Image (cartoon, rainbow, N blue to C red):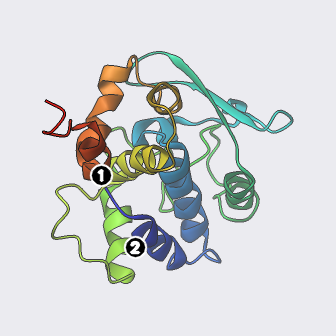
């Protein structure tokens, strides 16, 4: 996972004046703030956004279960900016995030968008060598750990990440050494 400082550094180098930068910024926020899987970000449609209620609802590709999450102001404005000022208008699709090279169509299912993250990490000067994974899923993992750091209860993290049960979410606990240390019994108590 990435630290909050690394995420902020990566996000700060995105050129939010370019169409591709607007797209990437919105997608990265959806992944690292809400923990949405890359495949679900690629499949988001205009109808998934309820701007009145400030919610995003979609059926998760992996689990087949519906997930509803709040749209934060930052995410909302990023998505709106991309739709209004960055998204190519040449392709008739209701998929929100599309390719920016002809043909202007939705991204393929086998495109894991790894190159997007590595480009911004490199541009921010972040050393990725110690990280086993550095794609979009690493942003989702970071979101889970950040929620854990904020002492969000595990069932809430499970709900936000759209996991079927807390056992799936518990994988994020193993990376938090400080929290694990709190679980260890003092040898004097034994």
x 73%, y 65%: residue: 85
Q: Is residue 178 visible?
A: yes
Mark seen at residue 178: 1
Mark 2 lies on residue:
120
Tally of marks: 2
Q: Position of residue 70 (x, y in %)?
A: 69, 37
Q: Residues within 10 Å of mark 1 (few under 14, many from 20)?
A: few
x 30%, y 39%: residue: 173
Q: Residues within 10 Å of mark 2 (few under 14, many from 20)?
A: many
x 48%, y 45%: residue: 147
- Nearer to me, 51 or 171: 171
Name the image quarter holding residue 184.
top left
Name the image quarter holding residue 44.
top right
Name the image quarter holding residue 22.
bottom right
* Horizontal side of residue 83 vs 99, given as left or right: right
Mark seen at residue 94: none
Mark 1 or 2: in front is 1
Q: Position of residue 153 (x, y in %)?
A: 49, 32
* Image quarter in which the N terminus is found: bottom left
Query: As displayed, is residue 163 above or below residue 69?
Result: above
Q: Which comes sooner in the sequence, label 1 or label 2?
A: 2
Q: Position of residue 10 (x, y in %)?
A: 44, 73
- Nearer to me, 1 or 52: 1
Question: Hey, which residue is sitting farthest front in the picture?
Answer: 188
* Image quarter in which the C terminus is found: top left
Query: As displayed, is residue 21 above or below residue 125?
Result: above
Q: Position of residue 33 (x, y in %)?
A: 54, 50
């Amino acid at each position: 996972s990435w630290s909050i400082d690394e995420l902020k550094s990566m996000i700060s180098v995105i050129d939010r004046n370019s169409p591709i930068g607007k797209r990437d910024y919105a997608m990265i926020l959806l992944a690292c703030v809400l923990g949405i899987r890359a495949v679900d970000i690629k499949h988001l449609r205009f109808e998934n956004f309820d701007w009145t209620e400030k919610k995003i609802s979609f059926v998760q590709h992996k689990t087949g279960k519906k997930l509803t999450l709040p749209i934060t102001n930052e995410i909302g404005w990023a998505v709106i900016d991309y739709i209004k000022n960055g998204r190519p208008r040449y392709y008739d699709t209701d998929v929100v995030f599309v390719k920016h090279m002809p043909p202007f169509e939705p991204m393929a299912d086998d495109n894991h968008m790894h190159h997007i993250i590595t480009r911004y990490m490199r541009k921010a000067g972040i050393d990725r060598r110690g990280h086993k994974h550095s794609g979009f899923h690493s942003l989702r993992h970071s979101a889970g750990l950040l929620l854990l750091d904020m002492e969000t209860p595990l069932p809430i993290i499970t709900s936000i990440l759209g996991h079927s049960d807390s056992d799936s979410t518990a994988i994020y606990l193993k990376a938090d050494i400080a929290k694990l240390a709190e679980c260890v019994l003092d040898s004097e108590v034994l």
